[in-house]
Image: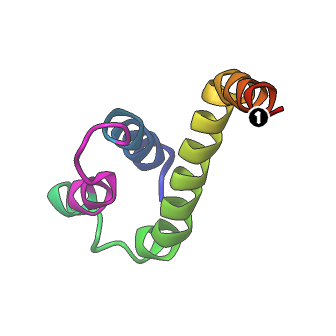
Amino acid sequence: MTIIQAIVLGVVQGLTELLPISSSAHLYLIPWVFNWTNSVDFNTAFEAFDVALHAGTLLAIVLFFFKDWLKLIVRRIQTSC
């Protein structure tokens, strides 16, 4: 997988993850459209890269909403006491 391919897939993941559509499907369609699936190097790295993209998205969402979740948890603890 080249750096350009990784950037393209990362941008697609970032743009489609929070939309109510399957970002995983886009990650399979983009390589097919650009005919990257014929490359052995691409196919070898793709599945691990796909998992890394989703893990990165999860980390970004957790970090972005962390303060909000803390406020909700503290509020819940205060109202239950």
Kind of residue at disc 1: Ser
Residue sitting at the far front = 81
Report whether 36 appears left or right of 63.
Answer: left
* The image quarter in which residue 16 lies: top left
Residue, x 52% and y 51% (percent of image)?
53
Dot 1 alpha-carbon crowd within 10 angstroms: few under 14, some 14 to 19, many 20 or more: few
**In the image shown, does 39 or 45 lie closer to the viewer?**
45
Q: Which residue is mark 1?
A: 80
What is the x, y in percent for residue 75? 72, 24
* The image quarter in which residue 66 lies: top right
**In the image shown, does 45 or 59 lie closer to the viewer?**
59
Q: Which residues are magenta?
A: 17-30
Q: Is residue 19 above or below residue 33?
A: above
Residue, x 34% and y 33% (percent of image)?
15
Indicate the colouring scheme.
rainbow
**In the image shown, does 46 or 75 lie closer to the viewer?**
75
